[in-house]
C-alpha cells in the first residue's frame, strides 16, 4: 500500500483510462484502489473523478482528471521530501 491512496469508482469515466497502471508506474508511492461504489453518485454521473487521500479531484475529461490527480499526488508527496 502506498502513502498516497487513489480511490476510484469502477463505474466512473476515469476508468476509460488505465488509471491503475498509469499512476502506479509513475508514482511507486501511490496505490490505486478501484471500488464498486464510492457513494458520490451525483459527481460520478457527470464528471470523471477520484479521491486522492480522501480529497475529491475531478475534471471535464478523463485526461484532464488524470493530470489533476498527478498534481494532487505531487502535493501530497511534497510533505515527505
Image (spheres, helix red, strand yellow):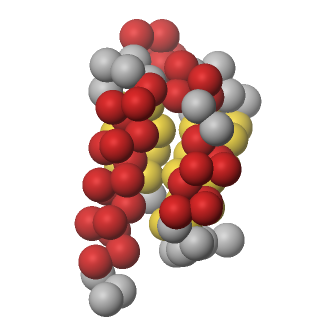
Q: Residue visible at 64% across and 20% down?
A: 11
Please indicate whether residue 9 sits to the left or right of residue 48 in the image.
Answer: right
Q: Which percent across, then down, holds residue 56?
A: 36, 40
Q: Is residue 54 visible?
A: no
Q: Nearer the viewer, residue 14 or 51?
A: 14
Q: Residue visible at 31% across and 44% down?
A: 68
Q: Residue visible at 55% across and 54% down?
A: 23
Considering only vertical position in the picture, is 27 above or below 57? below
Quadrant location of the C terminus?
Answer: bottom left
Considering only vertical position in the picture, is 39 above or below 57? above
Q: Nearer the viewer, residue 26 or 81?
A: 26
Q: Nearer the viewer, residue 63 or 32?
A: 63
Q: Which percent across, then down, holds residue 4?
A: 49, 66
Q: Which percent across, then down, holds residue 54?
A: 43, 52
Please identify the quarter of the rendering in which residue 51 is found. top left
Quadrant location of the N terminus?
Answer: bottom right
Amino acid at each position: 500500500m502506498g502513502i498516497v491512496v487513489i480511490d476510484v469508482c469502477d463505474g466512473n469515466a476515469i476508468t476509460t483510462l488505465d488509471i491503475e497502471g498509469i499512476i502506479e508506474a509513475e508514482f511507486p508511492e501511490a496505490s490505486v484502489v478501484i471500488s464498486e461504489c464510492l457513494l458520490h453518485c451525483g459527481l460520478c454521473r457527470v464528471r470523471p473523478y477520484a479521491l486522492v487521500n480522501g480529497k475529491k479531484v475531478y475534471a471535464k475529461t478523463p485526461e484532464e482528471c488524470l493530470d489533476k490527480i498527478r498534481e494532487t499526488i505531487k502535493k501530497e508527496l511534497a510533505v515527505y521530501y
